[in-house]
Image (cartoon, helix red, strand yellow):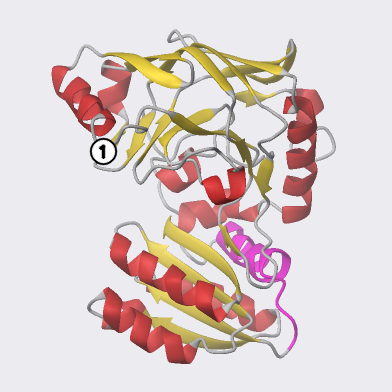
Amino acid sequence: MTLPSSPSPNDPNVQQGADVLATRCLCVSPGERVHLITWKLEELNLVVERALIRAGATVERIRLETMSDPAAVRAALGSQLHGATASLLVAADGIPVPIGVAVLDVIRRAGSRHLHVTRTDPRVFAQSMRAEPERLGMLNDRVASTLAPPTRIRVTSPAGTQLELALASQYPILSSSGRPKLGEIDNLPAGFVYAHPSVVSGTFVADRGLLGTGMRLTGAALRKSPVYLEFGSGRVVKVTCSDATITEQVQAFLARHSDAGRVGAMTFPTNYLVRSEIGLGIQDALLPGLSLALGTSHASVTKAPYDCPVQLRLFGRRLTVDADGKRLVEDGRFADWLVEGIDPFR
């Protein structure tokens, strides 16, 4: 499969993505001081900085490349972000996880409204970053109302996925539209609905991605040797794959914790501008369909009865999703009724 090449940071679509970030997502006010925290991507971050300035912001740039460890990040950012109202992190794929975690720790203490844009590149800005929060919010509402309990959700795929799920009223249906309030953090690109499912049974075929703690499998490896995961009572009960090495990796993950094989969350992506794989997980995770997260349940917000320190996200290709017989996604494409009046290209 040939993946699209990355456009120049000066491409008009990239600049539009930066403008949406500044004006529609971060909602910069004239004269507001914005802390732009960056890791690599100098050309792209200059585009972001100019977009913030066009929106009326005064930009304070903080380069993480000059900080060697998480302690240095916490010390430097702690003083610089004191009293901050708006901030964002824009970082290339490969930013060390401890550095990203340190940034989030400081942001939570600072209480700013914050956008987290990590593992990104110009392709993301030219595509999914252009999705408007207002439209994403409308689509999120449509999906949430359609999936609300006691709806039964059915997921199928040409590769053999045959999965049934249901939500329960005690577990809220949550969403991301990419517009945080003061004291909140959101990730870009945005656009998804998620919840802790009360029922998960059947088979999910992971033939597009296995991403999480100690594992990062995508692309040709899974197309050649997809992983078949059978579920019962919300847990993995069987793992099958023609590649013994992949099977061992999945089993090793499941052995990390007693709840590692439990479905912590299901996610329904809603970013209407994500249409095909680009080879970058931060956007490919938003392709239409439904994904599962094993382990971590984000219990503080999903109200799941447990949480887990490890996570493995499961992604499949060309999924079809029905809710009580009503089609939301067919063969990896949103149903027309779902995006009517939202997707400008439909």
**Image point (77%, 29%), residue name:** 338
Q: Position of residue 108 (x, y in %)?
A: 52, 72
| Picture layout, residue 263 above or below residue 19 | above
Rendered-image quadrant of the C terminus? top right
**295 to the left or right of 13:** left
**74 to the left or right of 82:** left
Q: Position of residue 205 (x, y in %)?
A: 41, 16
Q: Nearer the viewer, residue 266 or 29?
A: 266
The residue carrying mark 1 is: 215
* Callout 1 crowding tier (Cα within 10 Å): few <14, some 14–19, many ≥20: some
- Report the span colored magenta: 13-30
Task: Identify the secondary structure beneath mark 1.
Answer: strand
- Main SS, magenta residues: helix
Q: Position of residue 26 (x, y in %)?
A: 66, 69
**Image point (78%, 53%), residue name:** 134
Residue 47 in view, yes or no? no
| Picture layout, residue 309 above or below residue 142 | below
Rendered-image quadrant of the N terminus? top left
Q: Quadrant of residue 324?
A: top right
Q: Nearer the viewer, residue 161 or 147?
A: 147
**Image point (48%, 16%), residue name:** 233
- Kind of residue indicated by mark 1: Met
Q: Position of residue 292 (x, y in %)?
A: 48, 30
| Picture layout, residue 267 above or below residue 31 | above
Q: Nearer the viewer, residue 169 or 204?
A: 169
Residue, far right = 341
**Image point (58%, 28%), residue name:** 197
